[in-house]
Image: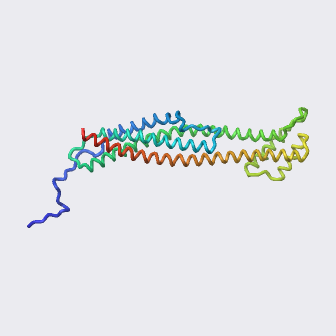
Amino acid sequence: MAFSDPLTTTDGPNLESSKSGIHWGSILGGAFVAAAISLILLPLGSALGFASVSVFNATEASLVTFTAGWAIWLVIMQWVSSGIGGYIAGRLRVKWADTHSDEVFFRDTAHGFIAWSVATVFTLGLAAIVAAGALTTGVQATATVAAGATDEVGYYTDSLYRTTTPSATAPAADITAETTRILVNGARNGSVPAADRAYLSSQVAARTGLSQAEAQGRVNTTLAEIDAAKQKAAQTAEAARKTLVAFHIGLFLSLLIGAFIAIVAAALGGKLRDNY
């Protein structure tokens, strides 16, 4: 009696197909549809207020609201674009004859994932180009803000020598410039040295007619206002940092959900393709 090896026995000839298991036509079609839908829904989300916040009145609460709304809209975009793109990639692929159903299912899910990948790379690449242009604008805006910050310090300098006496002698340009440098140095180092405070008080008293105590009070008030402005700017920057972190987490989750939806939609589209 002859025995056969179960490891080498097959039901029939193992013929390798001459056609690839990947159909790029359907993949690219689904990917471009997904990318187009994303680009259409992106400005719609901004128009509906999901990504609207005023940078001139940005509070921590408004930034959190901005992040939550934008994250929700990103998920919606991924649901719609990935679902439709994956379905098209699965529905438009060729019909694989003499292929096991498990292999067909794997190919369909792979087509959906690849279509999602192509659409994501294309969309993020376009976003990177837009971000590059925005970066150039941001550099120019930073220079403007820096100039504005210097002007703001100059405002505090002027407030030190402000007087209600119209005939009072205006502060000399060199004293004003020196005071500005003292304030800038104090803002950079975190505090104004006691010697500089005393010097500013004497200059204010000499040029405004205030007593030494009143001049010292004006100096202290001005320095407190500068510190408050610095703290407000630091709080806004920290809130913006937290918003950026939350935005990236939302982006990661939305892309992950989009990949899953594209896979499921492609499997559904491929199944309907084989049924008809």
- Identify which residue is drawn at 43% across, 48% down: 256
Q: Residue furthest left?
A: 1
Query: Looking at the picture, how far across and down is residue 166, in whole percent?
Result: 89, 32
Q: Quadrant of residue 134?
A: top right
Quarter of the image where the C terminus is located: top left
Residue drawn at the location 47% of the way across and 48% of the way down: 253
Q: 276 above or below 189? A: above
Quarter of the image where one finds residue 5? bottom left
Quadrant in which the N terminus appears? bottom left
Residue lying at 86% horizontally and 50% vertically, measured from the top left: 198
Image coloring type: rainbow
At 23% from the left and 48% from the top, the residue drawn is: 99
Report the number of discs. 0
Towards the viewer: 167 or 78: 78
Q: Position of residue 249 (x, y in %)?
A: 51, 49
Please indicate whether residue 168 sits to the left or right of residue 158 in the image. Answer: right
Q: Position of residue 156 (x, y in %)?
A: 78, 41
Please determine whether, in this image, residue 140 is positioned above or below residue 213. above
In the rendering, at what x and y percent does residue 218 appear?
A: 84, 44
Q: Is residue 64 left or right of residue 212?
A: left
